[in-house]
Amino acid sequence: MPPVWLLACLVLAWLQASQYALGLSFGGAWADFAGGILVGGGLILMVLAFAEMRRHRTTIIPHETPERLVQTGIFSRTRNPIYMGDALILLGLILRWDAVLSLPLVPVFVWIVEKRFIEPEEDRMRRKFGMEFARYCQKTRRWI
């Protein structure tokens, strides 16, 4: 499950910040502020996505095929608002914790999520929704 991967990355970042900081820092208050904005933004994206999927009565479980193709609300801006929210939370906490050496965890996390979850999900949706999903992919980006 994606939250397990997020938690693993967060634990690694926290351990790096607390045990292996090596005197590196993002430089103070701006990082705390930006980190807070990113974490808050990530949580908002996730809540908006959960609400929209619930409104359409479809699953949020990554390994299940959704009953409906949700293209409204936050899903009209990005095909993966929950995963984007996860990445924003990870980046935000890395900034807040001053975990400079953990910055590479963000692209690693995004890569893992794409390969393990997004690509298989999109394959299932392509099979189920056909041209409707293809049109959705043309008008809505995977991430931003």
Image (cartoon, rainbow, N blue to C red):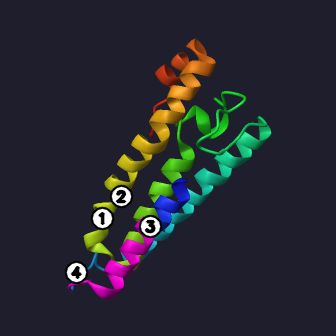
Residue 39 horizontal/vertical position (percent): 51, 64
| Relative vertical location of residue 85 with respect to residue 129 in this rendering, above or below | below
Q: Between marks 1 and 2, how big is the CA–CA gap?
A: 6 Å
Look at 58% across and 26% down and name the residue there. Answer: 125
Q: Main secondary structure of the magenta part?
A: helix
Residue where numbered disc 3 is placed: 8
Residue where numbered disc 4 is placed: 24
Which dot, 2 or 3, sits closer to the camera?
3
Q: Earlier in the sequence, mark 1 or mark 4?
A: 4
Q: Earlier in the sequence, mark 3 or mark 4?
A: 3
The disc at residue 103 is: 1
Please tell me how crowded label 3 is: few (under 14), some (14-19), or many (20+) other residues with Cα within 10 Å. few
Residue where numbered disc 2 is placed: 106
Q: Earlier in the sequence, mark 3 or mark 1?
A: 3
Q: Are marks 1 and 4 in contact (CB under 8 Å)?
A: no
Q: Between marks 2 and 3, how big is the CA–CA gap?
A: 12 Å
For mark 4, give the secondary structure. loop
